[in-house]
Amino acid sequence: MTRTRGDILPAIVFACSILFLGCENSDQTTALNSERELSEADSIHAMIMSNPQDPKVYAARAELKLKNGDTTGAIEDWDLALRADSNYAPAWEMQAEVLYQLRQFEPCLDKLENCLERFPDDVACLMRRAEFAIHLNQYEDAFEWLNGALRVDDQLHEAYWMKGRIYEATGALEKAQSSYQTAIEVNPGFFEGFITLGIFLASQQNPLAEEYYRSAMELRPNAVEPHYNLAIFLQDSGRYQEALKLYQKILKMDSQNATASYNQGLIHLVLLHVYDCAAFCFGEAIDRLPYYHQAFYNRGLALESMGQTQGALDDYTEALRLKPDYTAAAKAKERALRALN
């Protein structure tokens, strides 16, 4: 049926009404959320007034403050929870976690020591304490804390993963691989575990690395990291065309990824000797990251290889402007100047 102008006008008015109603509902939702949080805060405050010796009420207020971005207030409330009951384990755990995220490592370590003194089997504190030990290369201590956590719960995939890190750092590569594999067997959804195992195997030029990267890609199809790692692996394995396609896919996922363009340029320049494509890809990298001095230098090499010496000289000069101590660019610039004179 043909619609007249009279039919269309009410439809437009109705659509506008829906639009403004949506805005009103959005404002109402924000107001309701604020009222709900205010009501929750009032409720918690009332519980604190009626039962000031209960650590859980202070912990509840700490969680609310943390949700609203008040980390200092949250830590203070967990302190109040511990004053009410110094054996309230969640307060020790959460304080240590927040302090760790804030990179306040000394007070975090102090909280962890207090936690483990009172609760030697607290898994959260054992795991975080082990992580500290790994960062400090205190591997025997780290193993002790990790094994303590695994005695409580033998399904802690992160504990096996951390053991793998220690074994890899100390050169026990077979044990490292076994620990990494145990981590993903315990938790088949452990994305970081698949990435780590892929990187570990790739470092040994083991073709199984590809399998683990692809498993990570299945877990998170829109994550750039496994795609990029696989592209590097394919590139290092001489599978240049597959790597180029994967870099192109990465650029569709992340249009500002300068490194993907740069690596495409390197394949064309160094491995395939297709200099016009190399120059184009390095130019794409520069468009995405104007301070990419390596891209200017390598584009200069591509232009020089095509006989475009002046363009190459310009790129070498720009690379040196961005990085004055860039020795390779300085030598290339001298070569270009000699060719022009």
Image (spheres, rainbow, N blue to C red):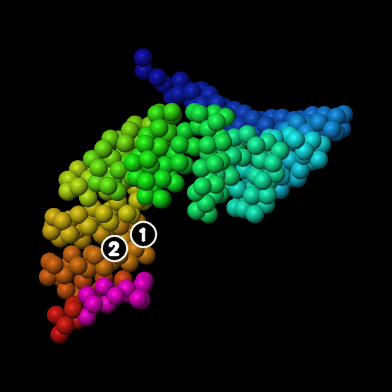
At 71% across and 38% down in the image, what residue appears?
Answer: 118
Q: Position of residue 251 (x, y in %)?
A: 31, 46
> Which disc number belongs to residue 295?
2
Looking at the picture, which amino acid does disc 1 mark? Leu
* Residue furthest top in the image: 1
* Residue receiving disc 1: 289
Helix, strand or loop: magenta stretch? helix
User: Which of the 4 image quarters holds residue 163?
Assistant: top left
**For residue 124, above or below residue 322:** above
At 18% across and 64% down in the image, what residue appears?
Answer: 302
Residue 111 forms part of the magenta stretch: no
Tell which of 135 and 225 is nearer to you: 135
* Residue furthest right in the image: 50
The answer to whether residue 63 of the structure is visible from this angle is no
**For residue 285, above or below residue 80:** below
Dots 1, 2 in contact, CB < 8 A: yes
> How far, Cα to Cα, is label 1 from label 2?
9 Å
Judged left or right of residue 330, residue 302 is: left
| First to last magenta residue range | 320-334
